[in-house]
Structures are given as structure tokens and as C-alpha cells.
């Protein structure tokens, strides 16, 4: 099973959407392997958004991501990275399709509710950034036979 990192941003926390977003992932059949609330620091933001640090809008990202705690989680499932990215929708909430998390809950490019890993390489690095190995759990969902076709995945 593939793992991916999801961050419920301050926009999700302040708008009391965390439960609804987590519920969508679980209803889809993704398994929560790790979950915790943390306060992003400037150092952690600079590391996580290192590809954007030199951009003029980085300080808007920093202010947004440190405004309040965030929820970080590791989700697991077949093709989890792609599934989560499809569920989250386009980065800009105004352009995200209805039915996606951003399409239903966001009107912004920055205050867009959720971050999701974009590739297996990014997921591996991001999971290690936010979770110690002992904070990620392996367990079997009893309903797997009702989520995945045993012959087709």
C-alpha cells in the first residue's frame, strides 16, 4: 500500500473543517496510518516549502501556515498519492472542480484547506519530516474486502 502526507492547513482548522476532510478520505477507503496536530514553525515552513522560499509570496505562505496549529496525517491505500491529489482538486480553490475538497471548501490559492504530497519521492521525504517511524501504525481495516476487489486491487 502506498503512503502519502496530508496537511490540514490553518484554513481547515479555523473553519472547523478538519473532521469533514478526514471523513472524506476515510469514506473513500484510505487508511489513517498517522495523525497528529502540530504548530508549524518558520524553520519547518522554510524546509517544507523550500522550493518557494525565494518567491515574493513566501511570507504570505509563512503567515498562513503558522497562524494556528495544523493537522498532519499519513494516509495509506492503493495509489494513495494520486487518489488524494484527485480528491483535493486544483491548488486554486476557485478553479477546483465541485466535489473536490478545495472545490467544495476553498475560494483561495493560499487558503486552500489542504496540502497533499505530489509524488512518491515527495511523500517519503514529507512523511519523514513530520513523523517518527514509531508514530506511523500498521493495522488491518476489517472492511478491506468491501473497499478493494480482491482480484483487481
Image: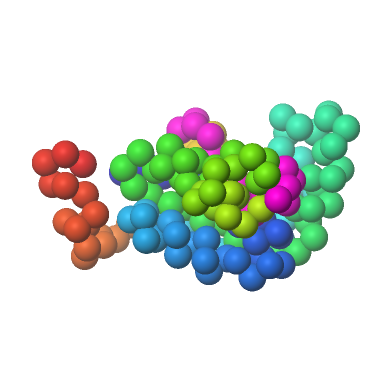
Principal SS element in the magenta part?
loop
- Location of residue 134 in the rendering, given as x and y in whole percent from the top left corner: 45, 58
Please tell me which residue is depicted at 24% across the width and 54% down the height of the picture.
Answer: 147
- Residue most toward the left? 151
Residue 23 in sight here: yes
Where does the image place residue 12, in percent across and percent down from the top left?
65, 61
Q: Which residues are magenta?
A: 107-121
Q: Residue at x 52, y 61 (%)?
A: 21
Q: How is the image coloured?
A: rainbow
> In the picture shown, does residue 55 fall above or below 151?
above
Which residue occupies the extreme front position in the image? 98
Residue 118, magenta (yes or no) = yes
In this rendered view, identify the residue nearer to me: 91 or 69: 91
Q: From this view, report whether residue 50 is shown above or below residue 96.
A: above
Where is the N terminus found, in terms of image quarters? Answer: top left
* Residue 126 shows up from this direction: no
Q: Is residue 36 left or right of residue 3?
A: right
Quadrant where the image shows the C terminus: top left
Asked if residue 4 is positioned above or below residue 13 in the image, the reply reads above
Q: Is residue 122 left or right of residue 32?
A: right
Please provide percent x and percent y for residue 8.
61, 57
Inspect the magenta stretch and tell me whether residue 109 lies in it.
Answer: yes
Q: Count the marks.
A: 0
Residue 81 lies in quadrant: top left
Residue beneath the point at 51% across and 56% down: 73
Q: Residue at x 70, y 50 (%)?
A: 107
| Residue 45 rendering spot, x and y as whole percentages | 74, 45
Amino acid at each position: 500500500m502506498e503512503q502519502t502526507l496530508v496537511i490540514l492547513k490553518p484554513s481547515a482548522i479555523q473553519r472547523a473543517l478538519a473532521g469533514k476532510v478526514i471523513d472524506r478520505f476515510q469514506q473513500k477507503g484510505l487508511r489513517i496510518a498517522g495523525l497528529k496536530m502540530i504548530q508549524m514553525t518558520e524553520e519547518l515552513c522554510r524546509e517544507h516549502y523550500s522550493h518557494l522560499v525565494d518567491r515574493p509570496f513566501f511570507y504570505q505562505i509563512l503567515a498562513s501556515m503558522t497562524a494556528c496549529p495544523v493537522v498532519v496525517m499519513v494516509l495509506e491505500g492503493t495509489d494513495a498519492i494520486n487518489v488524494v491529489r484527485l480528491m483535493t482538486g486544483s491548488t486554486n480553490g476557485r478553479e477546483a472542480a465541485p466535489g473536490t475538497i478545495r472545490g467544495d471548501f476553498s475560494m483561495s490559492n493560499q487558503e486552500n484547506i489542504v496540502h497533499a504530497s505530489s509524488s512518491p519521492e515527495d511523500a517519503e521525504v514529507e512523511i519523514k519530516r513530520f513523523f517518527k517511524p514509531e508514530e506511523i501504525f500498521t493495522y488491518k481495516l476489517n472492511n478491506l474486502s468491501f473497499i478493494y476487489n480482491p482480484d483487481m486491487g
